[in-house]
Image (tube, rainbow, N blue to C red):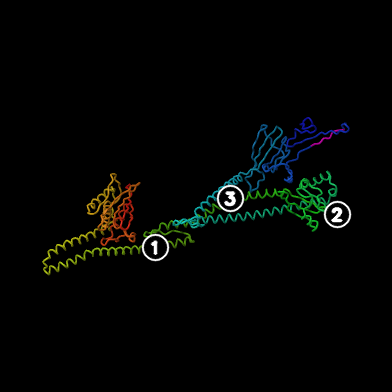
Amino acid sequence: MLYSSFKVSNYFYRENESFGFQNYFAILPVIQNDKTLGSIVIELKSKALQTSNYFPELLIDGQIEDKDDFKDYSYAFYSDRKLLSQSGNFVYSLRAKPTKRPVKTFIFKDTSNVKQPWYDPFTTYSHLIYKTNERNLIVVSKEKNKVFYIITSVTFFFVILLMFSLIVIIMNWAWLRIKILTITNNNIKWGFKVTFDKILYKTRIQFSMVFAVVITLILVGIITYISISTQYQTQQESMIRDKIARITAAFENGFFDKYMTKINEESQIAFDALASSYSSDLVLFDSLGVLRITTQPRIYEYGLIANHMNAKAFINLHKQFKSEYIDDEVIGGLSYKTVYAPLRNAKGETVAFLQLPYFSNEADYKERIGSLLNVMINIYALIFIAIGLFAVIIARQITNPLNFIQQSLSKTIYDKKNEPIQWDRDDEIGALVKEYNTMIAALEVSAARLAQSERESAWREMAKQVAHEIKNPLTPLKLGLQLLEKSWREKDPKFDQKFERFSKSFVEQIESLSQIASEFSAFAKMPDTRMERFNVFDVISQAVIIFKQMDNFNIIYRAPETPFFIHADRDQLLRCFNNLLKNAIEATPPGRFGLLEINYEITDGNILLTVKDNGNGIPQNMSEKIFEPNFTTKSSGTGLGLAFVKNSIENAGGKVWFETEQDKGTTFFLSLPAAV
């Protein structure tokens, strides 16, 4: 054995064949008076790593090592295919399967759990196998769950995305609905105002459902957290109470007087061995609460705790004769639970007090709570995703009928045939649809009656206007004929002169009647249009030539060389410009030199024509009625000229409007699209 070992120092050796363990032995000579009496052989074997860890972190020298990186791993050492040692949760076989893999190579292998629970079918183990030589084998194993890993990853990214989305949505919502500064009429007003008028009904349903579920999950999570924390604390208290009862019974049945007298190395070793057999730390106090012996003497040597028993525990046990006392104590930043119990002799007298501190309580509690929170976050995130999708589907199902009704309402036309909405279910939406169908039926009847009434009213107004316009020239005709008849009977010598004068007047009045009939006829024939493609500047030039010869009136217009073609009724557009030029001439007050200016502006696919005069302008109170039929600002006329202009331009797909200024003139704007 000596020759197969590696010498570490003068007396210590390490075994070369100690695979899986660190084994040392020492050969110490016994010398007395320079004479060697013999040798003492001491063998040291390392313990397995899965020993209980109840050593307080406060007493660890240097930086505390984080063992969490390897806590989920298991390992095993095999020699000659026999299991030497193992650690971790995986259950290894006592004999390894034969393998012909080359030495010093890594092999990866996945296996499933033999007794796999029904609720966890996706858990497998990944093994790393390393063959050091032909005899020795090392296996490192780790639990693996792909589904749980995927869910955890999705949950993490979902939570990040959700937080980012919430920030963006809240900022956008606040920007649109929170007003701090308001500017009105050149005034700046400061004030805080939140508006909720533009939130969709569907959004409200989704938000309400998600909000209700989130609040419920939070409440359930809080209740679960409190319940499990309380349950864990209760279990810990029950465990340490049971443990100290067994340890107290062992002390009382044995001889603990050696711990009450002088403490030596032998008694310390015996006390530590007793505590180690229960995997616990122990502290023994005498009947006055003074420290006698402990498994962690450095806590008291460093002055972290006084050499006396906890005051509350001493009062409860010594003064109030309690059989045990549990308390939460703190050393620096370490919180732990501890239990005290009295030790009695054969006479039932309390001769000492025993303390059992549970130093690993806080670490175990944090680990379990962390695992609980991890599981809860993953589950709640999946529930939140499912509820969010469910809320979107439900909101759409609820609002789809409303969208359908909204589309049907948008297609409702007053003077057209409206189809009723078909709805099969007899619910609230069905009642709304029924009322809508009843309404459109009544609306059609009302529309027919109103159309008939409007037609009758229009004919009455037209007849009244025609009668009024015809009556104006008929009155002077009647009076003239009566005067001629009287002159003829009385044999008036000036009869010929009067006849000639009245004849000219009769002709003018008859021409007026003809003009009135022509204007009404032209207005009535507006729908009969003949659309053609032509140059708009040719029509304007044709109208300008007729009126350019007027006295005391000037028209400024220069036709461009490049034509602009439109698609319209040429005759209607010519009469349109004739009406505008005629109105401009008639609007010029006496004594003012008339000036009319025609300009144009060509844009992409459109032409804007302006006809500007320097007449009296249009009164403000008449501006809204200027394009209505039968409305006129002149003492004579049918009031159909500008109505004809408006209809002509709109038939060509254009628009007409005007700007006016009293006593300075009016400008008409005509916008026409180019011919395709």
Q: Which residue carries the number 1 mark?
A: 443
Give the residues drawn in magenta, as a range: 37-43
Task: Give the amino acid type for the residue marked by disc 2 in the picture.
Answer: Ala
Q: Mark 2 points at which residue?
A: 346
Q: How many angstroms separate mark 3 from mark 1 (CA)?
A: 52 Å
Residue 470, how many percent across, how many down?
23, 63
Magenta residues, dominant SS class: strand
Graded by Cα atoms within 10 Å as few (under 14), some (14 to 19) or many (20 or more), the crowding at tag 3 reads: some
Image height of 83 relative to 574, above or below = above
Indicate which label's residue lies in the foreground, 2 or 3.
Answer: 2
Closer to the chain start, of discs 1 and 2, is: 2
Q: Percent position (x, y) of residue 640?
A: 28, 59
Along the line of sight, the residue nearer the viewer: 364 or 57: 57
- Give the residue furthest to the right: 33
* Picture disc at residue 207: none
Image quadrant occupied by the N terminus? top right
Q: Name the residue under label 3.
A: 382
Q: What residue type is labelled 1?
A: Leu
Is residue 671 among the parts visible in the rendering? yes
Left or right: where 386 falls relative to 21: left
Q: Residue furthest top?
A: 3
